[in-house]
Image (cartoon, helix red, strand yellow):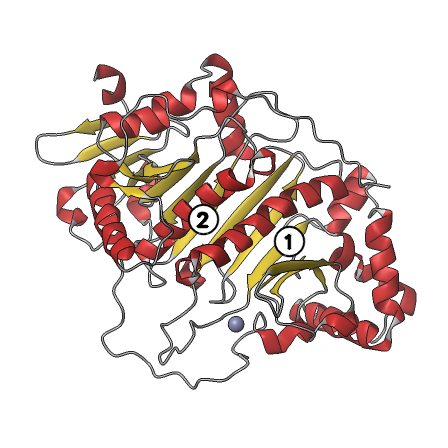
Amino acid sequence: MAFYEKYYHKMPDGTIKQINPFSNTEVWCVEERGRKPTINSVPHAPEPLDRREPEDYCHFCETNYIFTPPEKNRVYLDPAGSWKREPFIQSDSLEKYPAEFRRLGNLFEIVTYDYWRMNYGYVMPAFCKEWQDSYLASKKGYDHIMNVLELKLRMIGLDMSGMSEDERILKTAPFFGGCHELLIGRKHFVAGAESHHELCSSGELSPDEHYQYLLLAVDTLLDIYRQNPFVRYISVFQNWLKPAGASFDHLHKQLVGLDEWGVQMSSETESLRGNPNLYNELASNFAIYNSLLIAENDYAMAFTEIGHRFPTVAIYSKSHNCRPFEQTEDEIRGMSDLVHAVHCAITSQTTCNEEWFFAPFDSIYAAPWHILIKLRLHNPAGFEGNTKIYINPISPEKLSRDISEALVERRSAGLIAPGIRVGEEVRRTPNPLKYYLGTLKNISSEGHA
Ligand SMILES: [Zn+2]
């Protein structure tokens, strides 16, 4: 066990020192501080909710389509109950049927349209331009877009009254051809909610709904890449609740196109070049040999990953198809079911971040698609700031045990997808991740003009 000892060391007094094998982050779990609950419970005195249908609690709610940019894609249920999509929605379709999930440009981009335009000479492809032209051609569409633009400018202290028509139109380009996307769920609160804490998180969706939500994110990855050939990687994340960085307590994911791989994937890829079995040795086998397994199905597995500032559950795809959009429907569904199950276990009351990782578009090194769910149970403080040693209040074993126990309960209640094996039921076969047998496909940005 000496190999793992340098990453995961339990001291006689109970302190657990951990080094994250991928980022080298040093984390200690101090037993005295480890007696915190892993999953937040519901408030003792819940604040009653003034229930309104359709919901209008924030700008992401369904009565407020007018406050969000136009939809690049909408996922809805047709009258027969089948899942359907409508890309590039026109303004006259806005109220046709409720959007169970919708994809639209983020009002405040992290990597902006102008960043791509000015640094790379990016122009939006013809299909985006045609959509922009047709959207603005109708009075309803024009009014919607100008309303959103006015709102955006007002929020950053600008006034559009002095702008020429051409300037205004130019400023609407990010809504149609930007590369920072939001995926928003329909529900703010769960059906029948009576209190303010009954928010609709990922785990409150049904497994089917969660699959549609995750599938939309997978398809958006490819859409962004096809739209902008300068994109080398896409950051996919979900901040659940305001303390985790969310602007609204309304379920949404974000995807941000980047012109680099980011520090984390760059460093993982560097290690992968020297050790193609990196993710088995330091993620899944590590979890097997150190009893950190949580759950699995035929396509993915979940376990505690050590050395994170926040208690972290990792969900790894077992597939030899590496990138999310290279996987079969069953494989994507398998990932979705496990991610959903973990969210269901931690409940809507636990603030968390969900972060995705996969092989960048211009990488030749096969890496498994994996998703980390980080539980924001504490705030790093001054000690962390000046030592770079982070205190994580939940030990890896306790996290695995608590989430597994919660999953057994959720499974008995029929809340998670079938086919999930939990705790001791997880198979302990070494090298369960088959990414190293796969090849990465070259994706062309064929949709680009
Ligand atoms: Zn809302």
Which residue is at the front of the view, 438 or 242? 438
Disc 1 + disc 2, Cβ < 8 Å: no
Check the image and report above or below for 306 versus 249: above
Residue 374 screen position, x and y as percent: 37, 47
Q: Which mark is residue 30?
A: none
Q: Residue at x 52, y 64 (%)?
A: 247
Which residue is at the front of the view, 364 or 409? 409
Residue 30, quarter of the rendered image: top left
Q: Residue at x 83, y 59 (%)?
A: 131
Which residue is at the front of the view, 419 or 178? 419
How many marks the image carries: the answer is 2
Q: Residue at x 36, y 28 (%)?
A: 283
Residue 308 screen position, x and y as percent: 34, 39
Query: Could you tell me how far apart the alpha carbons at marks 1 and 2 are, in whole angstroms?
Result: 16 Å
In screen coordinates, is 392 left or right of 131? left
Which residue is at the front of the view, 311 or 155? 311
Residue 298 screen position, x and y as percent: 39, 35
Question: SS at mark 1?
Answer: strand
**Which residue was labeled with disc 2?**
354
**Which residue was labeled with disc 1?**
181
Residue 59 screen position, x and y as percent: 59, 72
Q: State whether label 2 is within 8 Å of ligand 1.
A: no
Question: SS at mark 2?
Answer: strand
User: What's under tag 1, amino acid-wise?
Assistant: Glu
In screen coordinates, is 167 left or right of 90? right
Residue 169, quarter of the rendered image: bottom right
User: What's under tag 2, amino acid-wise?
Assistant: Glu
Q: Residue at x 21, y 17 (%)?
A: 1
